Image (spheres, rainbow, N blue to C red):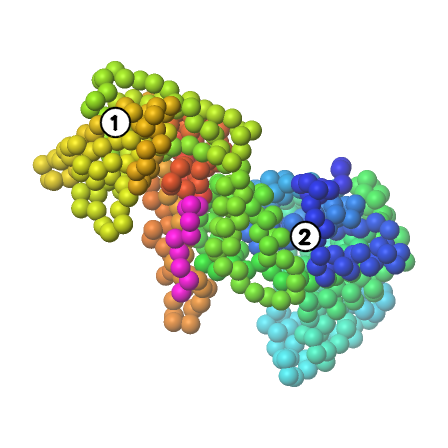
Amino acid sequence: MSEATTPAADAAPEKRDFIRQIVREDLASGKHTAIKTRFPPEPNGYLHIGHAKAICLDFGVAAEFGGRCNLRFDDTNPAKEDPEFVRAIQDDVRWLGFEWASLRHASDYFEVYYLAAEKLIKDGKAFVCDLSAEEVRAYRGTLTEPGRNSPYRDRSVEENLDLFRRMRAGEFPDGSRTLRARIDMASGNINMRDPALYRIKHVEHQNTGNEWPIYPMYDFAHSLGDAIEGITHSLCTLEFEDHRPLYDWCVDNVDLAGHPELLEPLVAKGLPKEAAKPRQIEFSRLNINYTVMSKRKLTQLVTEGLVDGWDDPRMYTLQGLRRRGYTPASLRLLVDRVGISKQNSVIDFSVLEGCLREDLDATAPRRMAVIDPLKLVLANLDEGHEESLAFPNHPKDESQGQRQVPFSRELWIEREDFAEVPPKGWKRLVPGGEARLRGAGIVRIDEVVKDEAGQVVELRGWLDPESRPGMEGANRKVKGTIHWVSAKHAVAAEIRLYDRLFSVEKPDDESEGKTYRDYLNPESKKIVRGWVEPAAAAATPEQSFQFERTGYFVADRYDHRADAPVFNRSVTLRDTWTAG
């Protein structure tokens, strides 16, 4: 496998943060000659935008310092895990622009973990406990009171080994026994009060089937997994800071580097024996207002039908953001803009949207589309009039070339570009008034056609022939310019107008007896039928455009076809939300 990579890593300016400074110092001092990191998600759900920061950091640090980054699935809780999530996570990492050095699973190391647990028992540092989960909590103590020793804490090494091996053989029911570390029930850090290392779970595993009726706990498996892979810098979010003493305890007391015999099961799997002592370093999570990022709540949104699946474009999963039209470059830009620190903070949603606008403004081709159509007939053109006008694909990037846009006597324009009674400062169409048809000339509205209900259904106008492209009056000044599509050539499209899923900054705030469900934005999804120019309809799935004067849109990843286009609004041209 190739080394961890990041887009344009060589050309990017050097990044400065406390983690990269630690890495630089470790390399300069000779503590490490090669950097190894890992991204270790649990495959119990889809990754969300918060994971983008961890992915960019884990893979980015490895790439910037010529190192390697593994993708390791923490598959130690098979009851909640699914191969569907495994596939989606791999897809997400590659979509963001990264490639792992090696693909691993915690389950690859189950035999090593088991031997390590036996070593701790033999060293008198672990024991089998018969307390129930409720009893363990009662014995644990509080932040101000020490815990009490389990009555099973002083079992002999022989009895503990026998019981643990019988746990392994599947003799005992779920939850009846655990293997616990023997540390200190009076520790000020509750994580160090004889934490569980193994629990009994008769659950089939996606990789190992029914081979194991016992599974290692996260802290035990994660720390030893890092040690097994020779990880030099184990980067994780701040909630794991209190777990670091246990992480170090597991690494130090198992001492894989000093006991290579524990690594023998790796040989049979063709895996290298790279054991080393990793260093855990914590950083702040990516928190954004107007969102929820709890996997439990995201799962509830899906299972309760409040959204249209994990990849609903309103979801903050990477799959949802991708379908919405967010680009890998925009998310990497967000991570760079937010920075890496130990200070927890909440980023305004507008920062995320601003990163997407910045990327798409520079890269997205322009197209014309009409979302709320109103017919405009240019009465002074022949009924069969038809021509083709040259438009730049991007006004700031000549390398994107030009396209031909059909023009005819009948056009679709946006209904909001006409007002019978214009408000103050109006610069678009009014009865008897003029406006410029983008790239085509100046039109004057001569007649307003209404239906029986008084609704405007058609405008009839006169196109000034002297204002056509290349004519002497083409630069004549008028106040407003509007976009259009040729009614004869336009392609009918389904246009999905997405907005923020929640209507308040803190949907997690339950202080008033409400839940995030009460803050769902009823305007977060609207589906309309509009018209797009042929060059937009011909888009490939996931191709992004700026629909001129309207916003940035993407051809839907799954539903879009050239003969039945479907576009999702990624973001409006300007921020339409205000704080508070």
Q: Which mark is residue 189?
A: none
Whether residues under marks 2 and 1 lie with C-beta atoms below 8 angstroms apart, the answer is no
Residue drawn at 23 percent across, 50 percent down: 423
Residue 57: image tag? 2
Q: Residue at x 64, y 47 (%)?
A: 205
Label 2 sits on what residue type? Answer: Leu
Q: Is residue 240 above or below residue 409?
A: below
The quarter of the rendered structure image containing the N terminus is top right
**Callout 2 environment at 10 Å: few (<14), some (14 to 19), or many (20+)?**
many
Badge 1 local density, few (<14 within 10 Å), some, or many (20+)? many
The residue type indicated by label 1 comes to: Leu
In the rendered structure, which disc, 2 or 1, sits on the residue that comes first in sequence?
2
Disc 1 marks which residue?
463
Question: Front-most of 83 and 344?
Answer: 344
Percent coordinates x, y for residue 195 in the rendering: 70, 69
Q: What residue is at 74 percent from the left and 56 percent from the top?
A: 20
Q: Which residues are magenta?
A: 571-580
Residue 542: % across, % down:
50, 34
Q: Answer yes or no: is residue 103 visible.
A: no
Q: Secondary structure at mark 1?
A: strand
Asked where in the image residue 22 lies, by quadrant, the reply is bottom right
